Image: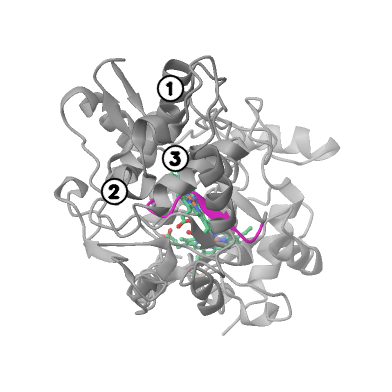
């Protein structure tokens, strides 16, 4: 089911020299769905994360989640739980895992996998209704995932 | 880490329960023109296998203003389409020089129990037909006229007319016999999570009806109100066109209107509404 790909130190170092970005198919989820390592090695920027959370063309997390700190943006959804205090409930590795591939943390979750490139049924080309390519471009880039995680960490009780 | 995990899981679980406990639909009741009572809430049919306890018309999830537009034919923009279709009903066309009325008389008498039982198996043709396919079959086979084509304006208008005279009739779509396999296929499609967002019809319309998503209040996705006049695009919308929009929104490759897959899905979704009343042309946002 889950693809566990050994992540050798050598590979990290070799890749780290150029770009340290982990490709979606190489992401290693832990036993509880967490992702221990940063996907890029570059610290996330919470301000960018806020943009991703609230932009329709990006994460649009508020389509499903209520976030009090984002009240200035209209129309928060009710499909997922409120994210208030998410940074106190979860640690960084867990949040990275939830945003990149929530189904590893919550089996059968309604929440989309934002860093996943293959294994879809009838993959489309964005919102055109036409056929898409497989593998496809993940919904968010590795750095956008890190930015969102950094933003979620600011949501403390 | 484990401890945080557990706390997180409990918080999430509590919130999910909370969300499902939310009051899903309003308590309003629908009477059109002060005389046609519309059943907008009914016990779910046995073939829903307990997936839903009660089925609700999409009308119950709309704002008071949108609801009001459907309560009086003068305020319902979909009724203008019905007037257009009334002209078409009485107009002779095609090589046979016949009108709908020549065979079916007054629609208000002959068509009251039609919309409620479609899609329906046509024994002679050996195929499942939705109402639009049946209308085009009449045009090409009985009148020798040209097909209107699925979801085209005169087609949606005529579908609206046939629905309007059946308003209040209880939906009762057959799911057994020759359509049983197609119904199964439709059910499977309903529960398949498609596209890059990996969402099924059931994720939104069974697990989350009553909740807000992307600034819209999710209904059960019932089709008793079709064709629907949507304020968003200011025209009548057909069932399968609506399906396309929903599938597209999962970032999936959609099926074509009239495809075997959408025929199966229409049959299945229609049957989920057995017990509700025909309501089209309805008004939705």
Helix, strand, or loop for circle 3?
loop
Query: Does A118 appear in magenta?
Result: no
The residue where tag 2 is placed is B272
How much space separates mark 2 and mark 1, taking CA atoms? 26 Å
The residue where tag 1 is placed is B137
In front: label 2 or label 3:
2
Helix, strand, or loop for circle 1?
helix
Neighbor class of circle 2 (other Cα within 10 Å; few <14, some 14-19, many 20+) is: many
Please identify the dominant SS of the magenta region: loop
Q: Seen from this angle, which residue lies furthest bottom?
A: A157
In front: label 2 or label 1:
1
Compare residues A16 and A23 and report the one nearer the observer: A23
Q: Give the range drawn in magenta.
A: B223-232
Point out the tag, 3 or 1, that comes first from the N-terminus.
1
Point out the tag, 2 or 1, that comes first from the N-terminus.
1
For residue B193, which numbered disc appears in the image? 3
Q: Which residue is drawn at 56% across and 32% down?
A: B254
Residue B202 locus on image (x, y percent): 38, 49
Query: Does B230 appear in magenta?
Result: yes
Q: Can residue A35 be seen in this view?
A: no
Residue B73 locus on image (x, y percent): 50, 66
């Amino acid at each position: 089911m889950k693809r566990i790909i050994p992540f050798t130190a050598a590979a990290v170092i070799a890749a780290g020299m150029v770009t340290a970005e982990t490709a979606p198919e190489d992401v290693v989820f832990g036993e509880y769905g967490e992702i221990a390592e940063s996907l890029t090695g570059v610290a996330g920027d919470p301000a960018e994360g806020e943009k991703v959370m609230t932009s329709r063309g990006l994460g649009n997390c508020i389509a499903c989640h209520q976030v009090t700190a984002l009240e200035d943006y209209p129309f928060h959804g009710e499909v997922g739980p409120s994210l208030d205090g998410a940074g106190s409930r979860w640690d960084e590795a867990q949040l990275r895992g939830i945003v990149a591939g929530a189904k590893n943390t919550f089996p059968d979750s309604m929440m989309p996998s934002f860093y996943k490139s293959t294994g879809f049924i009838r993959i489309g080309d964005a919102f055109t209704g036409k056929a898409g390519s497989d593998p496809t471009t993940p919904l968010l880039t590795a750095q956008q995932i890190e930015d969102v995680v950094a933003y979620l960490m600011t949501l403390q009780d | 880490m484990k401890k945080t995990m557990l706390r997180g899981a409990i918080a999430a679980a509590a919130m999910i329960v909370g969300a499902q406990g939310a009051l899903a639909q309003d308590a309003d009741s629908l009477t059109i023109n002060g005389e046609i009572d519309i059943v907008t809430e009914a016990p779910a049919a046995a073939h829903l296998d307990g997936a839903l306890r009660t089925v609700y018309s999409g009308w119950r999830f709309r704002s008071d203003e949108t609801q009001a537009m459907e309560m009086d034919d003068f305020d319902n923009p979909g009724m203008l389409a019905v007037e257009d279709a009334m002209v078409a009903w009485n107009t002779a066309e095609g090589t046979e020089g016949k009108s709908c009325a020549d065979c079916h008389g007054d629609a208000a008498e002959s068509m009251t129990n039609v919309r409620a039982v479609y899609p329906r198996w046509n024994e002679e043709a050996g195929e499942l037909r939705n109402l639009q396919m049946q209308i085009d079959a009449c045009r090409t086979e009985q009148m020798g006229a040209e097909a209107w084509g699925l979801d085209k304006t005169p087609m949606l208008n005529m579908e609206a007319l046939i629905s309007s005279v059946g308003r209040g009739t209880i939906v009762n779509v057959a799911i057994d016999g020759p359509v049983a396999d197609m119904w199964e296929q439709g059910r499977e499609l309903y529960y398949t999570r498609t596209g890059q967002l990996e969402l099924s019809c059931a994720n939104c319309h069974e697990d989350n009806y009553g909740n807000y998503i992307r600034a819209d209040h999710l209904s059960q996705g019932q089709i008793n109100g079709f064709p629907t006049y949507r304020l968003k695009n200011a025209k009548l919308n057909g069932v399968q066109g609506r399906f396309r929009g929903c599938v597209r929104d999962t970032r999936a490759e959609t099926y074509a209107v009239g495809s075997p897959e959408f025929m199966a899905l229409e049959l299945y979704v229609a049957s989920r509404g057995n017990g509700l009343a025909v309501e089209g042309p309805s008004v939705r946002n």
